[in-house]
Image (cartoon, rainbow, N blue to C red):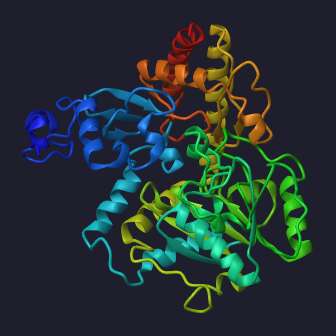
Amino acid sequence: MPNTDSMIPACDPDRCAAAGCTPTVCVGAGVASNHELFARSQRAIPGGVNSSIRAFRAVGGEPYVVASASGATITDVEGTTYYDLVQSYGAIILGHAHPAITAAVGAAVVSGTSYGAPTPREMKLAEAIAERVPSCERVRLMNSGTEATSTAIRLARGVTGRDRIVTFAGNFHGATDALLVAGGSGVATLGLPGTAGVPDAAVAETMVAPYNQVPDLDDRVAAVIVEPIAANMGVVAPVPGFLEGLRAECDRVGALLIFDEVITGFRVGTGGAQAKYDVSPDITCFGKLIGGGLPIGGVGGRADVMEQLSPLGKVFHAGTLSGNPLATAAGLAALETLTPDVYIELMARARHLAAGLRDACAAAGFAASFPVVGTLVGIVCGDDAGTVHDFDDAKRTDEAAYAAFFQAMLAEGVAMAPGAYEAIFVGLAHTDEVIAAITEAAGRAAVVAAAG
């Protein structure tokens, strides 16, 4: 077997001291190429990536390999710096390597990285979430958004004694078997059926309804799970009456209403989408922002529901790394920084960026719209795309046009998500100057994309 270490140049301390290199293998800026490292990754990791969309299959080419990030930018291993509109798919809101986050993690790590025992910070983070989201009388922490949604489904079934789950086409709730049906985000981007490797029995009790339409429920339904703002098929707002109708229909048949706020929680405001639309779910799923950029998930809800989780109740949940001291430290620092004034500023920046991108594309003759919901920005490409209300509308987006715009933006130094159904994330590091630079780049990129 070949020595793959020899295929990567040796570390140059003067150029890569801060980039995480080892003495024998350089993974730092300016030495190894993106292509070399991605090729090596493919020999160790299926597809070379640990999350499918990162492989660039939907947009063509090969991914850049990140060496570092700061504020609104990321820098790859070749030393190329990009304005970042991905922001770790919404896990980052203050900017990369924000001083409040790095200081909190740095202070925590010297005391250890995992204990398998209760800690003060996990209690404080649960309290901070409950204080900001009134529907969450109790909060259980875990390790990812996927774990949060799977736990919420198990909890709803255990509490109600029912099996059926209702979800919505184009909503994405992580890699949970029962919910990988007609999903948005990476499932839609990759053109997958959503259920490969999942037994029929796992989805036999999952009913898929059109987004923005209230389904008729019956007494077999344990729960309805929904993205209150659909951020995995572009950015689609709930139409008036949709969330209220779900609340009423769940109440009518005794089902639980689950809001998947893994993206919207603490992204669109202090209380998330449920505060924005004044609709309270029984259970809320969290992730991304509550970890300040570190891996985390959470489930919150009514006390009588949440206390059905073990050890108090009959619904099992456990996790070796749940309530991790580094993630909770980062999460507390993030939530403490996100004041109401910050959200007002972020909403203004989202509108500013969306308007700049819209005008740049229009001037170049490149058909694209940029819907805004609170602090979230979407992108819909194509003359026939129109206004998006549901997944059928979203699928009219021109994925080839998006791929062309993505590649042109990347060439101009702007990194977007490598999939046509993802959101654009604006954070505190996207200053007026950064937004101006991005929109200027978009004008040039749109000309290239419009020319095919």
Residue at 73%, 68% (x, y): give it.
205
- Indicate whether 411 appears above or below 226: above
Residue at 85%, 65% (x, y): give it.
247
Task: Tell me if 97 is positioned left or right of 179 in this view.
Answer: left
Q: How many marks?
A: 0
* Residue 356 position in % (x across, y down): 63, 21
Front residue of 342/413: it is 413
- Indicate whether 291 appears above or below 283: above
- Indicate whether 303 appears above or below 265: below
Residue at 50%, 63% (x, y): give it.
144
* Residue 408 position in % (x across, y down): 48, 18
Which residue sits furthest front? 200
Front residue of 391/135: it is 391
Front residue of 243/355: it is 243
Which residue sits furthest bottom? 312
Indicate the quadrant where residue 450 lies. top right
Task: Tell me if 366 is positioned left or right of 277 in this view.
Answer: left
Residue at 29%, 61% (x, y): give it.
106
Q: Is residue 209 visible?
A: yes
Front residue of 93/181: it is 181
Task: Tell me if 256 is positioned left or right of 3 in this view.
Answer: right
Indicate the quadrant where residue 449 lies. top right
Quarter containing the C terminus = top right
* Residue 41 position in % (x across, y down): 27, 43
* Residue 72 position in % (x across, y down): 44, 36
- Indicate whether 431 appears above or below 219: above
Q: Is residue 425 visible?
A: no
